[in-house]
Image (tube, helix red, strand yellow):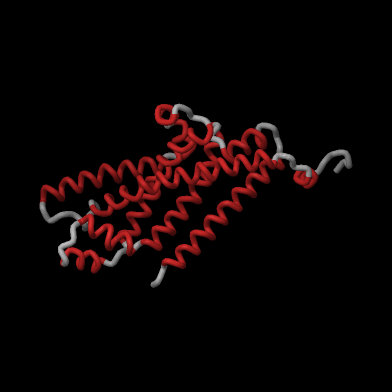
């Protein structure tokens, strides 16, 4: 290599985009945190409803069971559609919705609605599967004591699956970090936007490498914190 040509290592050593990296990292954390909050608020009830209306958990009354079957079919279809759509395509399709909700499709604000809509169905399925793993004896005991559906959910099902729910939240948070990076393709802000504008469009490989490294560190930290919380709460 010509001595006058700077190597990749020299470019990394001379890296002077740390202020932009810091701002983009903060934006990514805000996007992930806010989106995770709304994902839990939407996905947790949706997962509970999917579980309660799924086959094997329906009312013995024919009319009620029929309504539960219709509800499950509609919600399950919607969840499957949103889960099967590639996130980049979903970002583009949701541009009018995002503009209507947030007033903009750019930056941190413009990324939150598609992130929530894209990941909430995934979290709902995780919740549904966790609830299915609860021992049926717990449900039978609640019914025998005359507990209502609401009491069964809040006093038995959710406490029983709390370690698993924390694990699901951890997996969802990691997925949101990756999705937030994808949103940079349409100007969503954060590390993904920085990688596209400074790394890809300006052919700055150092920015790309540092951005990827920061994303890896964020994922590892989230996984570490989540694993420790799960171990602390898991008394089995």
Q: Is residue 96 above or below residue 13?
A: above
- The C terminus, quarter of image: bottom left
Q: Identify which residue is drawn at 20% across, 65% down.
A: 142
Rendered image quadrant of residue 232: bottom left
Q: Identify which residue is drawn at 52% across, 30% down.
A: 106
Along the viewing direction, whichever of 29 and 80 lies nearer the viewer: 29
Extreme residue toward the bottom, this view: 236
Q: Along the horizontal axis of the image, is 24 left or right of 100?
A: right
Give x and y (percent) for residue 138.
25, 67
Give x and y (percent) for residue 28.
55, 43
Extreme residue toward the right, this view: 3
Number of numbered discs visible in the structure rendering: 0
- The N terminus, quarter of image: top right
Q: Identify which residue is drawn at 50% across, 51% down.
A: 174
Q: Is residue 231 above or below residue 90?
A: below
Along the viewing direction, whichever of 13 and 60 lies nearer the viewer: 13
Give x and y (percent) for residue 123.
39, 50
Give x and y (percent) for residue 85.
42, 39
Q: Identify which residue is drawn at 27% across, 50% down.
A: 49
């Amino acid at each position: 290599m010509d001595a006058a040509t700077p190597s990749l290592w020299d470019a990394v050593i001379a890296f002077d985009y740390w202020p932009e990296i810091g701002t983009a990292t903060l934006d990514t954390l805000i996007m992930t945190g806010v989106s995770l909050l709304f994902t839990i608020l939407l996905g947790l009830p949706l997962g509970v409803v999917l579980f309660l209306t799924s086959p094997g958990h329906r009312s013995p009354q024919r009319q009620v069971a029929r309504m539960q079957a219709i509800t499950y079919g509609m919600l399950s279809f919607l969840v499957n559609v949103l889960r099967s759509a590639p996130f980049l395509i979903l970002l583009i399709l949701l541009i009018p919705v995002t503009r209507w909700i947030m007033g903009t499709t750019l930056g941190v604000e413009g990324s939150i609605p598609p992130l929530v809509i894209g990941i909430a169905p995934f979290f709902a399925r995780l919740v549904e599967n966790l609830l299915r793993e609860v021992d049926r004896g717990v449900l039978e005991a609640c019914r025998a004591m005359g507990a209502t559906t609401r009491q069964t959910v809040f006093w038995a099902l959710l406490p029983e699956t709390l370690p698993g729910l924390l694990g699901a939240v951890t997996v969802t948070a990691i997925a949101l970090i990756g999705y937030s990076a994808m949103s940079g393709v349409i100007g969503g802000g954060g590390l993904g936007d920085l990688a596209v504008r400074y790394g890809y469009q300006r052919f700055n490989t150092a920015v790309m490498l540092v951005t990827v490294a920061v994303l890896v560190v964020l994922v590892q930290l989230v996984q570490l914190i989540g694993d420790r919380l799960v171990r602390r709460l898991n008394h089995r």
